[in-house]
Amino acid sequence: MIHKNITTVFLILFASMGWSQAKKIVILKPIKAKSSFFTLVERDTLQTMVELKTLIDNLQYELRYASKHNFTGKRMYPRNMHTTFLRLKPAIALAKVAEDLKEKGLGIKIWDAYRPYGTTVRFWKLIHDERFVANPSKGSGHNRGTAVDLTLVDLKTGKELDMPTPFDDFSTAAFHGAINIDTMKIRNRVLLKNTMEKFGFLPLETEWWHYSWPGASAYDVLDLSFKALGSKID
Ligand SMILES: [Zn+2]
């Protein structure tokens, strides 16, 4: 009888531990204070967040989260924002990508780069599905200023090149492995991938538009506003 009771106690204990583990969300401690961030940059210049247009000519911004034209249907960034950031190394690499594409008469359009951690938390509250949005317990490359969402444009017309899907389309047609697609769209997707990889970016199998810089864990998750990073907000 005692044995049975002890077993029951252990069963209840393990069950409750399992429950608390399942419920547990590790909350990251992002850098929120501008002063802490700039102290960090003073110690290590690689932590610098670079406004991409200060480094790259002919860059187009269509920052989808600064409008309602995104998968949430809600505006997540300041209205009419015309600025975005990456850490120094990926920003320099992206400038090399732009130089390389320029020789082909092509340019880059950015849909998103740095994303404050608070926005990732808001995405999670709205969507709560790891297939579509980053789990805040991990933080994302966007929160570290090491990931960028982009497409190719024709420099003469300014128009986007045809790609397999629109931005933030979560169907399998957005996968790099998707082949049952118009040949020209595949060619454009592959050109973007080859050029990004040539300068060190890593692709994401499920999103043809998302690229990240290796070694993201060397960079802290940030929860600083674009304004705090030195943006020009209209
Ligand atoms: Zn992305």
Image (tube, rainbow, N blue to C red):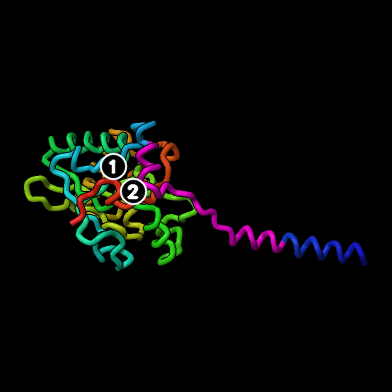
Above-or-below relation of 169 to 96:
below
Q: Quadrant of the C terminus?
A: bottom left
Task: Residue 173: tell me if it is visible.
Answer: yes
Query: Which residue is label 2 attached to?
Result: 176
Image point 45% across, 40% down: which residue? 217
Magenta segment boundaries in residue numbering: 15-40
Q: Is residue 104 left or right of residue 73?
A: left
- For this orientation, the residue located farthest to the front is 35
Label 2 CA crowd tier, 10 Å (few <14, some 14–19, many 20+):
some
Task: Residue 166: tell me if it is visible.
Answer: no
Image point 36% across, 48% down: which residue? 142
Query: Which residue is label 1 attached to?
Result: 193
The answer to if 34 sits in the magenta stretch is yes
**Where is residue 138 shown, x and y percent of the image?**
48, 50
**Where is residue 230 shown, x and y percent of the image?**
25, 46
Above-or-below relation of 49 to 131:
above
Q: Are marks 2 and 1 in contact (CB under 8 Å)?
A: yes
Label 1 CA crowd tier, 10 Å (few <14, some 14–19, many 20+):
many
- For this orientation, the residue located farthest to the left is 156
Element under label 2?
loop
- For this orientation, the residue located farthest to the right is 1
**Where is residue 51 shown, x and y percent of the image?**
24, 43
Q: What's the residue type where badge 2 is placed?
A: His
Q: Main secondary structure of the magenta part?
A: helix
Image point 34% across, 32% down: which residue? 45
Instruction: Point out the frontmost of discs 2 and 1.
Output: 1
The answer to if 80 sits in the magenta stretch is no
Alpha-carbon span between mark 2 and mark 1:
9 Å
Above-or-below relation of 175 to 36:
below
